[in-house]
Image (tube, grey):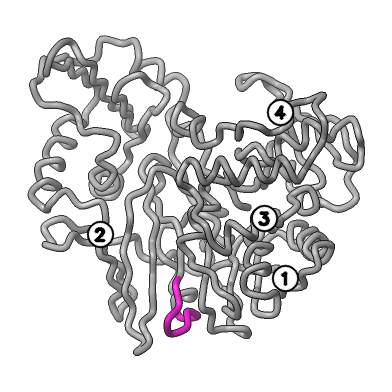
Amino acid sequence: MSTLDTSPARSDRATARAARPVEGTAPPGAAVDPAAARAAMVAQLEEKGALDPGPVRDALMALPREVLMPQAYVRRSAHEENPPRWDLLDWSAPQDRPELLGLLYGGGSVLVQHDGEPLLGRARGPRSGASITSMSTVMGLTAALLDELDLRPGQRVLDVGTGAGVTAAVACQVCGDGGVVTLDRDRHLTDAAAVRLADLGFRPAVVCGSGEEGCPERAPYDRIFVSYAVERVPAVLVEQLAPGGRLLVHITTASPSWPALAVVERAADGQLHAELRATEFAHRAGYGMDRIFLTEELRNRIATEPGTWTQRSMLAPPADTDRGLWLAADHLLGGLVRDFSAEHLAIGAPGCGSWLRVEPVGHRRWNVTTSGPRDIWKEVQDLTALWRTAGAPNRYRLSFDPDGTQRAASDCRRLSWQLPAPRPSNERAVS
């Protein structure tokens, strides 16, 4: 599965900006011109700064997404409607093409699998109940990460989390399909990807298996890309990284609010150099990973209740752009979830029911309302002071100790934390 994290904590204005359809794509009823829609999508990505000139841009310009995703779902029910309803659109049905074209080249997530179904041989039409179990990632995120991967001809690439096959297709186009391995735990996804990549003329190794194991028989790899978020960098994938290689994977806690991108590079002498970069958006959490969310009831309490107390403060709340602080808060404060749909800062702790609401009430004045056993405001302000003392970093060095410990730290080491230890083998999640 590969997608932007659109969990309740991020079903908000920020996610809406990331998933906003690209201007110029065809609305229902318009003429169907995939080449024009593809060019418009790429131009918009370039305009937004998500894509630079180079081989990834050229590959996306050449990639007919309707071949990789000849069917996709569109939601027909309201967000709160239960059971949810979708329609499966099919490129082979002329009446579906205008709407499907907008989905494929609109820049947002493309819903490709419902309730774990096989992707090959499906009949178009309505579905209800259950949930969408695989999506193709928001294009702005995919393009930026593929640029960061720095793909080059002749590289050996491991794509962990095949999904709809977009990353694998770009890697095949840029590097040559002979060195590309794409891996997913869902055989329905790998079966479909093998067929559709072949339709594009690509025949990479398509493997059904555990993302935590990688594909050691074809290692080492010059580039490894993981299209789901994890709690720590998978050690086995680091071992499969070649000298001069680069690995990209999103790191998150149980909270979906403040993720990071881990960039791991192996030097020519075999030494590892890695960092965590605070980021606004990330892939969804991997299979089996525990998550915490704000319920609708807790959201309403944060928005409307008077709380235990309200104080007038001259201390400004941290800015949304202080992502290095929020990343540290995710790991050091723990159990907090941001309500990004709120107009101002709103944070809840689902485990104990504590919450924080901060509202401006004039020039350099804020009303700070809290409730519950945790004083979230004090926790955040104390960490803010430590973060500023550490130089207000947005990136942290990531170290790998011989005993398997992974630790993130600021350059001055005044701010650091340890990533979770590996789970026992019988509890491991796979991609």
Residue that mark 3 sits on: 163
Residue 396 image label? 2
Where is residue 266? Give x, y as percent.
38, 79
Q: Quadrant of residue 75?
A: top right
Residue that mark 1 sits on: 206
Mark 2 surroundings within 10 Å by alpha-carbon count, few (fewer than 14), some (14 through 19), many (20 or more): many
**Label located before the other in sequence (3 or 2):** 3
The residue drawn where x is 62% and y is 41% is 109
Position of 134 with respect to 14 (left or right) is right
How far apart, in angstroms, are the residues tagged by discs 1 and 3? Answer: 11 Å
Give the overall secondary structure of the magenta segment: strand
**Label located before the other in sequence (1 or 4):** 4
How far apart, in angstroms, are the residues tagged by discs 1 and 4? Answer: 30 Å
Q: Is residue 138 above or below residue 215?
A: above
Residue 296 in view, yes or no: yes
Residue 333 in view, yes or no: no
**Label located before the other in sequence (1 or 3):** 3
Where is residue 200? Give x, y as percent.
80, 62
Dot 2 amino acid type: Tyr
Circle 1/circle 2 CB separation < 8 Å: no
Q: Over which residues does the magenta segment extend?
A: 239-246
Residue 75 image label? 4
**Label located before the other in sequence (1 or 2):** 1
The quadrant the C terminus occupies is: bottom right
Residue 100 or residue 23, whichever sits in front = 23
